[in-house]
Image (cartoon, rainbow, N blue to C red):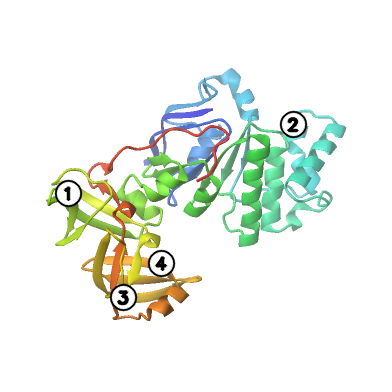
């Protein structure tokens, strides 16, 4: 439905986007994640015709939206946008929601009916006569969503829709996004710096870094099979080990400073790689305990045990540092503390390798999901 073809944008001497290319399929939720300043908001503004690109094309249903002047109003009316900081007028909630319908010349009966439907959709039934500026931040964001959805857009653009909201409001907004997509079939693109929000909501995720998409794929692909070392670090993979592929008795392993690590898939000997291992895939056992059968078992010393919500982050020096996430009960049952000798065990299949000069090892899955695709 939406095609980004080599899109670039600069502000003065600062290049914000360079060569951005991607496709967004009809009826999917597409998350744009990335660090602050990576160009997420700028990209959404370009799609929404609020800014013009310096180069490249943006197509909606095959139409170049910035080239076809006579098509711009029609394309613009296909879209609704909600900004990070919801702007509300100093009037009632109902009048705020009705703005787009008034611009389109809808009659009073139609406006009243659609506003009531929108209030019900966002869980604000009975709020119509309240002053919009007296609402909480989460409620104002829901008013903004209702204002965007009352015009029945085919495309909904959300720029950091839950930034600075409390956890309860975040949950309500996320539920709304999923329901809008599921019940109305609305194509949704949203930006977020919260990588886990992208994982929760999106059919596909695009990781925007250094002005371009470093990787586009399903949440499972992006979060477990990152394309580069930088993507791996951004999506929360703490264990990244550099080494060189060597031949050991006819099988490929990685020599990481004299320590041998087996992975599920590796290129040929001599390749410099970074091994990415999620903390959840590491098992910590006592020196005489059983490791993962056929897996990697590395002896080491516990250097720290830090609380992380209901879990603990256990860091072990095995010649290189590895971190594992364990429950408090698991830590207590192991009887470990700083200075304890342990074995870190993990399966070769849990190790994802990326070439340090070219990115991910193996084939990248780029097939788009159909409208009914489930989030992974």
Please give the residue where the numbered disc 2 appears in the rendered image. 103
Circle nearer the N terminus (3, 4): 3
Q: CA distance from mark 3 to mark 4?
A: 16 Å
Please give the residue where the numbered disc 1 appears in the rendered image. 251
* Dot label at residue 325: 4
Circle nearer the N terminus (2, 4): 2
Q: CA distance from mark 3 to mark 1?
A: 28 Å
User: Residue extending furthest right?
Assistant: 109
Q: CA distance from mark 2 to mark 1?
A: 68 Å
User: Residue, x 41% and y 44% (percent of image)?
Assistant: 221
- Please indicate whether residue 142 sits to the left or right of residue 49 in the image: right
Q: Secondary structure at mark 4?
A: strand
Q: Secondary structure at mark 2?
A: helix
Please give the residue where the numbered disc 3 appears in the rendered image. 286
Q: Secondary structure at mark 1?
A: strand
User: Residue, x 26% and y 46% (percent of image)?
Assistant: 265
């Amino acid at each position: 439905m939406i095609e980004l073809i080599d899109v670039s944008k600069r502000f003065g001497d600062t290049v914000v986007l360079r060569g951005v290319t991607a496709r967004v399929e009809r009826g999917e939720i597409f998350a744009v994640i990335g660090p602050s300043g990576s160009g997420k908001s700028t990209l959404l503004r370009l799609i929404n015709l609020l800014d013009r690109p310096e180069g490249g094309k943006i197509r909606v249903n095959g139409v170049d939206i910035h080239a076809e002047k006579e098509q711009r109003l029609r394309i613009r009316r296909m879209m609704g946008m909600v900004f990070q900081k919801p702007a509300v007028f100093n009037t009632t909630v109902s009048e705020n929601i009705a703005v787009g319908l008034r611009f389109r010349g809808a009659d009073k009966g139609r406006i009243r009916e659609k506003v009531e439907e929108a209030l019900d959709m966002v869980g604000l039934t009975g709020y119509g006569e309240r002053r919009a500026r007296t609402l909480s931040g989460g409620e104002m964001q829901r008013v903004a969503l209702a204002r965007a959805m009352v015009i029945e857009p085919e495309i909904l653009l959300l720029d950091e829709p839950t930034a600075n909201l409390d956890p309860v409001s975040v949950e309500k907004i996320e539920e709304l996004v999923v329901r809008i997509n599921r019940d109305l079939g609305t194509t949704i693109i949203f930006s977020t710096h919260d990588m886990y929000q992208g994982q929760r909501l999106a059919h596909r995720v695009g990781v925007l870094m250094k002005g371009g998409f470093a990787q586009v794929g399903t949440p499972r692909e992006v979060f477990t099979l990152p394309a580069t070392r930088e993507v791996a670090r951004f999506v929360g993979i703490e264990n990244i080990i550099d080494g060189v592929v060597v031949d050991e008795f006819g099988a490929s392993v990685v020599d990481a400073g004299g320590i041998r690590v087996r992975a599920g898939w590796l290129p040929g000997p001599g390749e410099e790689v970074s091994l990415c291992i999620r903390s959840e895939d590491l098992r910590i056992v006592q020196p005489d305990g059983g490791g993962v059968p056929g897996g990697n078992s590395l002896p080491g010393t516990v250097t720290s045990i830090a609380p992380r919500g209901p879990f603990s982050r256990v860091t072990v020096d095995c010649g290189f540092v590895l971190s594992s996430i364990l429950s408090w009960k698991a830590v207590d049952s192991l009887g470990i503390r700083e200075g304890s000798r342990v074995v870190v065990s993990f399966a070769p299949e849990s190790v994802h390798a990326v070439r340090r000069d070219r990115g991910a090892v193996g084939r990248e899955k780029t097939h788009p999901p159909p409208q009914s695709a489930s989030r992974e």
